[in-house]
Amino acid sequence: MPDVNKKFKPGSFALYAVLYTTLTFCALVTLVPFAYLACASLKPLDIFFDNLFLPSGDGLFGVGWDKLNFDHYVRLFAEEGFTRPILNSVFFASVTGVFATLFAATSGYALAKFRFKGRDSITNLVLAALVVPGALLLAPVYQLLYWFGLLDSYAGLIIPALAPAFGVYLFRQATINSVPNEMLESARIDGCGEIKIFFTFVLPLIRPMMGAFLLLTFLGCWNNFIGAQIVLQTPEKMPLAVAINQLKGVQGTDYGLIMAGTVVSILPVLGLFLLLQKEFLSGLTAGAVKG
């Protein structure tokens, strides 16, 4: 029989009560902007500023439910043509996320487990690239894309993001902490090639880090606003972030329409996070403990 007195020490209930109360309060504070966003996307413009969240009325809980509608969402797809920007963002973020994760994983594995001339210099170069602000690279990247004829194309957005320095160094550290050299040597003795070793043995061990990095990369590409406007010129190729910004009118702004577009932009990322949340949390703590 378990010792209940040892399991539940005096004062532990009060400690947990305070802890969960604090966490619940923080969760509610975090969810308030999302609740406002959802409510604002359903309110017509003529009553948009009358109430902070839901409009008042004679309905249940004193809410005017009859005043809410989905007109903003209908307008997004029927009038504003939001289907194309969504598909553009899905393509750009998915392709970039998958290939950037794969290339960063292979590069980090090579820096961690292979010995070759110049390895330390390349590692130091990757570390130096981490401290360079991304805004300083906009002009040289634009010049390179112009020389290679990649402007106004998705290749001009995807190729510069395929080997991020942060991802290369991240996977280098993950490989050092998670992949034992003895396992690699045993696989080589058994006749496995380097490609088979990487896909069969290494990738499963660094899978949590891959899930976390894939989610971060997808989110960064999904919210890409400045880079897309610099590289792309054709309106039909613009991603969702740019399309939402273009909802602002010249003589007036339909805030409900912008809120609806923001809700649409959040849902795919939220779904991806729910799908990869286990790998994301495991990846964040993968390097905390070695062994």
Image (cartoon, rainbow, N blue to C red):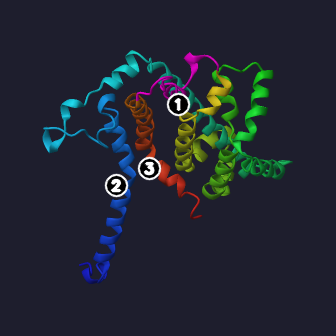
Q: Which residue is mark 1?
A: 241
Where's the N terminus, which quadrant? bottom left
Instruction: Please tell me which residue is depicted at 34% across the width and 33% down the height of the picture.
Output: 41
How many neighbours does mark 2 have within 10 angstroms: few (below 14), some (14-19), or many (20 or more)?
few
Of badges 1 and 3, the one in the foreground is: 1
Mark 1, secondary structure of its residue:
helix
How many neighbours does mark 1 have within 10 angstroms: few (below 14), some (14-19), or many (20 or more)?
many
For marks 2 and 3, give the CA distance: 22 Å
Q: Which residue is mark 3?
A: 278
Q: In the image, which residues are magenta?
A: 233-254
Mark 3, secondary structure of its residue:
helix
In this view, the residue in front, 110 or 220, is 220
Q: Which mark is residue 28?
A: 2
In this view, the residue in front, 247 or 166, is 247
Q: Which mark is residue 66?
A: none
Instruction: Please tell me which residue is depicted at 37% across the width and 44% down the height of the picture.
Output: 34
Q: Position of residue 263 (x, y in %)?
A: 40, 34
Position of 217 with respect to 86 (left or right) is: right
Position of 38 with respect to 131 (left or right) is: left
Position of 210 with respect to 273 (left or right) is: right
Residues at discs 2 and 3 in contact (Cβ within 8 Å): no
Q: Amino acid at mark 3?
A: Lys
In this view, the residue in front, 62 or 148, is 62
Asked if the magenta segment contains residue 240, the reply would be yes
